[in-house]
Image (cartoon, rainbow, N blue to C red):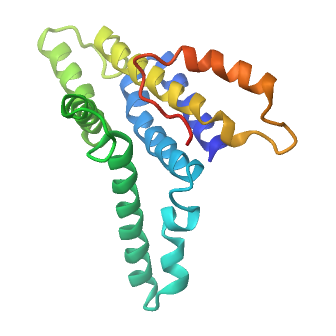
Amino acid sequence: MHLTVFRTVRATEVLSVKGYPLQGYALQRSIKDQVFTLWAIANNMMSFGELFGWKEAFTSGGTRDEILRKMAAKRMRAEHKIRSLIIGKESGLSEDTQAQLLGWDQMFNLETHRGLFTLFDTVDEALKGKLDVVGLSPVELNDAMFINRSNELNWMILRLIPCIRRKEVIWGDEWTKKWDLLEEMRDGVPDFRLS
């Protein structure tokens, strides 16, 4: 999963650099879900089998389609639970912070599922007579949305580094000293510290 996350981060960067920041922004939605899932696994909240619904496939009977529906339902319940613990009602965050995070997520979904920000930018350019060809659209707001989400996701990914530490690397004074430097930089950023 870590490799998948890093490859997807790279894909978003390529999209952004090539002039498609909103498409990279939409792809970041997948990264967020992957990071939330890794957080749940790292904190022993759930196993891969539970998160992906595999447990349902091996423990319930029925047709292939019935099993796939049960697996999908299980995944959705698991994702909802994780989301609630990280940024929702069970997170301990203030209601105002939860509302701000929900608004940010809704913006995310508008681009991810309907490409509405891309559509609105294109229509705006066309109405102003600035659109010669449908394609690249350098708008500062698009870049800002991408960069803000990128910084947030990269921080969350960084917080999961201890999970990929090899067994032969001992969590000792040297590791702790380096990790404490990162801890000092986390002011104002959601706390993804491992329990």
Residue lying furthest left: 127
Residue drawn at point x = 61 percent, y = 43 percent: 4
Among the 4 quarters of the image, the one containing residue 102: top left
Image x and y of residue 62, in percent: 43, 91
Residue 103 appears left or right of 73: left
Residue drawn at point x = 73 percent, y = 19 percent: 177
Tell me if residue 60 comes above or below residue 20 in the rendering.
below
Tell me if residue 30 comes above or below residue 18 in the rendering.
below
Among the 4 quarters of the image, the one containing residue 152: top left
Image x and y of residue 73, in percent: 35, 69
Image x and y of residue 79, in percent: 39, 55
Residue drawn at point x = 51 percent, y = 50 percent: 40
Front residue of this view, candidates 19 and 133: 19
Residue 178 appears left or right of 93: right
Front residue of this view, candidates 153 and 81: 81
Residue drawn at point x = 51 percent, y = 16 percent: 17
Front residue of this view, candidates 194 and 5: 194
